[in-house]
Amino acid sequence: MIKAKSSFMEARLKAGFSMRELAGAAGISYGAVFHIEHGKSVMPKSARKLCEVLGVEFDEVFMIVKKGRKADGETGL
């Protein structure tokens, strides 16, 4: 399972994107970006697209976690 690190939102803001703008640039839905920023898992293809648009490496903003486990830096409540 792929989850966003807390640095994901920071990378988005530094790049100057709103959630809607990032979604459009990456070709994914606004809802997907919203859920990613709020701790839901992300599909590998979407994670790759988001990294490309943000100009960051995967490990800077995402992590791979085993199902049912939380990892350091995970977003969400």
Image (cartoon, grey):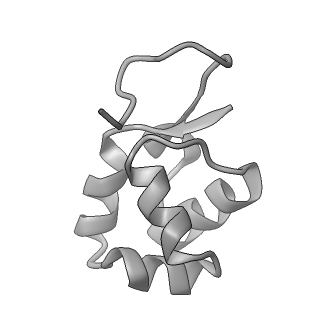
- On screen, residue 35 versus residue 12, left or right, reads right
- On screen, residue 52 versus residue 15, left or right, reads right
Residue 9 vertical placement versus 39 (above, below): below
Residue 40 vertical placement versus 56 (above, below): above
Give the x, y percent position of residue 42.
Answer: 63, 48
67 or 62, nearer to the observer: 67
Give the residue at x 61% y 15%. Answer: 68
- On screen, residue 37 versus residue 55, left or right, reads left
Residue 8 vertical placement versus 59 (above, below): below
Give the x, y percent position of residue 43.
Answer: 71, 51
Give the residue at x 65% y 67%. Answer: 49
The mark total stands at: 0
Quadrant where the image shows the N terminus: top right
Q: Quadrant of residue 54?
A: bottom left
Quadrant where the image shows the C terminus: top left
Give the residue at x 53% y 49%. Answer: 57
Give the x, y percent position of residue 40.
Answer: 52, 43
Residue lying at the far right in this picture: please name it.
45
Give the x, y percent position of residue 64.
Answer: 62, 28
Give the residue at x 35% y 36%. Answer: 75
29 or 6, nearer to the observer: 29
Residue lying at the far top in this picture: please name it.
69
Residue 7 vertical placement versus 72 (above, below): below
